[in-house]
Image: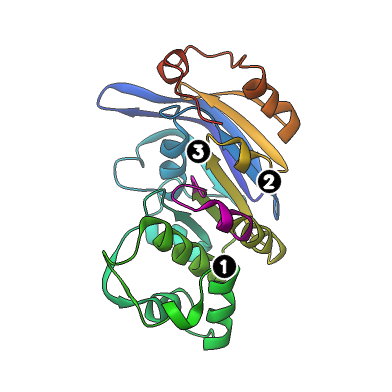
């Protein structure tokens, strides 16, 4: 048994079955990738694991450290150490970056906050007192959200499209921050359709049409993309929209 075990999980929304009999186990302190085309069910699975509204009425079970969390609220799961960074991070009107980071962990010093911001390629002197509002780009807010997760050191960190909106020069900083999460004891789940993100995973799951098609090393899963032989008739693949 790993730190997080998904057992025969299925999800139906508005009469449509979105996830089909998912079985996955995640071990402690490992970096995983959940890979597949847009609309394949990756984010829906993450929302089920987080217990978001509309994604709690599942079939099957979710075990965290051997305990079922199927009926737990979002805040209860968060207190246990499960967190999700959104593909499009929220704005927090009225909060400065420093206040937001302090909310992640009140015990962190200013120096530790500055170090976390530096890990994601943000100059603390430029950002600590800035408001988290429309003056920040999506990429900047995404970096700040990741820095807050580095501060929290959660047991499970799910990162939805961690490279989305991030400039190329900052990507290596983002990947280093992800490695730091692992070193601090986190299990990291990267939700992606990007080969550049997949390269940083130790274990990967290939997903399409709400099903797990395969599991293996980064090299094994990457072959599906390199050879364009993904065994799935997903519309985004048929239309040539699969990204690399």
Rendering coords of residue 211 (x, y %): 52, 23
* Camera-side residue of 172 and 151: 172
Region of the chain picked out in magenta, as a range: 160-173
Residue position for label 1: 150
Q: Is mark 3 on a helix, strand or loop?
A: strand
Rendering coords of residue 237 (x, y %): 47, 18
Q: Does 93 sit left or right of 172 as displayed?
A: left
Mark 2: few/some/many CA within 10 Å (<14, 14-19, 20+): some
The residues tagged by marks 1 and 3 sit, at their Cα atoms, a distance apart of 28 Å
Mark 1: few/some/many CA within 10 Å (<14, 14-19, 20+): many
Find residue 152 and report its image quarter.
bottom right
Q: Which numbered circle lies on residue 61?
A: 3
**In the rendered image, which quarter contains the N terminus?**
top right
For the point 57% across and 67% down, which residue is it? 150
> How many numbered discs, if any?
3
Q: What element carries label 1?
A: helix
For the point 48% across and 62% down, which residue is it? 143
Q: Earlier in the sequence, mark 1 or mark 3?
A: 3
Relative to 66, does residue 185 appear above or below in the rendering? below
Q: Which of marks 2 and 1 is nearer the N terminus?
A: 1
**In the rendered image, which quarter contains the C terminus?**
top right
Q: Which of marks 2 and 3 is nearer the N terminus?
A: 3
* Camera-side residue of 28 and 125: 125
Task: Please check the rendered image and state whether residue 15 is part of the magenta-colored stretch, yes or no.
Answer: no
Rendering coords of residue 77 (x, y %): 46, 58
Rendering coords of residue 61 (x, y %): 50, 38
- Residue 129 shows in the view: yes
Q: Which numbered circle lies on residue 200?
A: 2
The residues tagged by marks 2 and 3 sit, at their Cα atoms, a distance apart of 28 Å
């Amino acid at each position: 048994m790993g730190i997080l075990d998904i057992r025969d999980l299925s999800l139906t929304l508005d009469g449509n079955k979105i996830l089909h009999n998912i079985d996955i186990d995640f071990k402690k302190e490992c970096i995983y990738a959940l890979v597949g085309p847009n609309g394949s069910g990756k984010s829906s699975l993450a929302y089920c694991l987080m217990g978001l509204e509309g994604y709690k009425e599942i079939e099957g079970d979710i075990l965290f450290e051997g305990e079922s969390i199927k009926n737990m609220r979002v805040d209860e799961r968060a207190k246990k150490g499960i967190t999700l960074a959104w593909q499009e991070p929220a704005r927090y009107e009225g909060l400065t970056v420093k206040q937001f980071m302090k909310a992640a962990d009140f015990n962190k010093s200013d120096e530790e906050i500055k170090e976390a911001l530096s890990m994601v390629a943000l100059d603390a002197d430029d950002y600590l007192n800035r408001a988290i509002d429309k003056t920040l780009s999506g990429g900047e807010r995404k970096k700040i959200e990741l820095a807050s997760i580095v501060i929290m050191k959660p047991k499970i960190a799910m990162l939805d499209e961690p490279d989305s909106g991030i400039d190329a020069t900052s990507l290596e900083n983002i990947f280093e921050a992800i490695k730091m999460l692992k070193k601090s004891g986190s299990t990291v789940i990267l939700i992606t359709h990007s080969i550049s993100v997949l390269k940083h995973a130790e274990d990967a799951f290939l997903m399409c049409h709400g099903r797990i098609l395969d599991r293996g090393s980064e090299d094994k899963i990457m072959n599906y993309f390199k050879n364009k032989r993904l065994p799935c008739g997903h519309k985004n693949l048929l239309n040539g929209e699969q990204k690399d």
